Each structure stands twice: as C-alpha cells, then as structure tokens.
Image: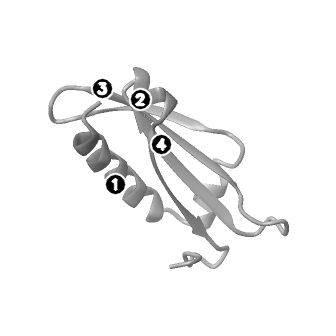
Amino acid sequence: MDKAEAGEILARITSELRKQSYEELRGFLRDPHMREASGAGGATYQVEVQVFWDDRQETNLRVMVSIDDGGLSAFKPLSDDFIIAPDGSFVGE
C-alpha cells in the first residue's frame, strides 16, 4: 500500500465527514459504511466508516475512518477519527 497516497485519501474523506451534521453522522450509527476509492496512481483502496457512541450517556459520536488496499494492510489499516457533540462541536479539539 502506498501510505502517502492512502493518507491523502483518508484525510480527504475524513474532512468530508467533518462537514456533515451530527444528525447525518448519526445515520451511520452501528451500520458501517464501506466504499472504494481510487488513488492517483491507479490503486484501489477500501474505506470503512464506523460511527458509535463515545460516552455512556449516548450523546457524543465517535467517527472512525480506516483505509487499506485489501492486501496485508487490511490487518493494520491507516485510520483517523473524531468525536462530534450534538451541538456540532468537535470534542477534544
């Protein structure tokens, strides 16, 4: 896996998700979203988006994004995450 290329795709997708509202992201709750993304070099990557509660009160959502090329990198994908509160603010930033 080209980590630089995969990292760029990961950053782009994470940035797109951060623009979505809390309610839109809540729609992904407990239902992982899978998609493919192509890199500039022609490689195809698998992207998984998972959303789950980050606290016991079930208010804040943790959004986790991971990417791999379907090979050995699937055992240790690149990943990024963020936590969003119901008011749309990002927790811990």
Q: Can you say whether 37 is above or below 59 in the image?
A: above
**Residue at label 3?**
44
Q: Earlier in the sequence, mark 3 or mark 4?
A: 3
Task: For mark 1, give the secondary structure.
Answer: helix
Is residue 36 shown above or below 88? above
> Who comes first in sequence, dot 4 or dot 1?
1
Residue pointed to by mark 4:
66
Which of the two discs, 3 and 1, labels the residue nearer the N terminus? 1
- Residue 6 horizontal/vertical position (percent): 30, 41
Label 2: state its secondary structure: helix
How dense is the environment of label 2, judged by Cα within 10 Å: few (below 14), some, or many (20 and up)? few
User: CA separation, marks 2 and 3?
Assistant: 13 Å
Residue wearing tag 1: 11
Return the x and y of residue 2 as percentages of the image width and height: 24, 34
In the rendered image, the quadrant that contains the N terminus is top left
Distance between the alpha carbons at the discs numbered 3 and 4: 14 Å
Callout 3–callout 1 Cβ contact below 8 Å:
no
x and y percent of residue 64 in the render? Answer: 55, 51
Would residue 54 appear left or right of 69 to someone viewing this image?
right
How many labels, in total? 4
Q: Amino acid at mark 2?
A: Ser
Within-10-Å neighbours for mark 4: few <14, some 14–19, many 20+: many
Q: Closer to the N terminus: mark 2 or mark 3?
A: 3
Residue visible at 56% across and 78% down in the picture:
92
Type of amino acid under label 4:
Ser
- Residue toward you, 52 or 28: 52
Mark-to-mark CA distance, 4 and 1 = 10 Å
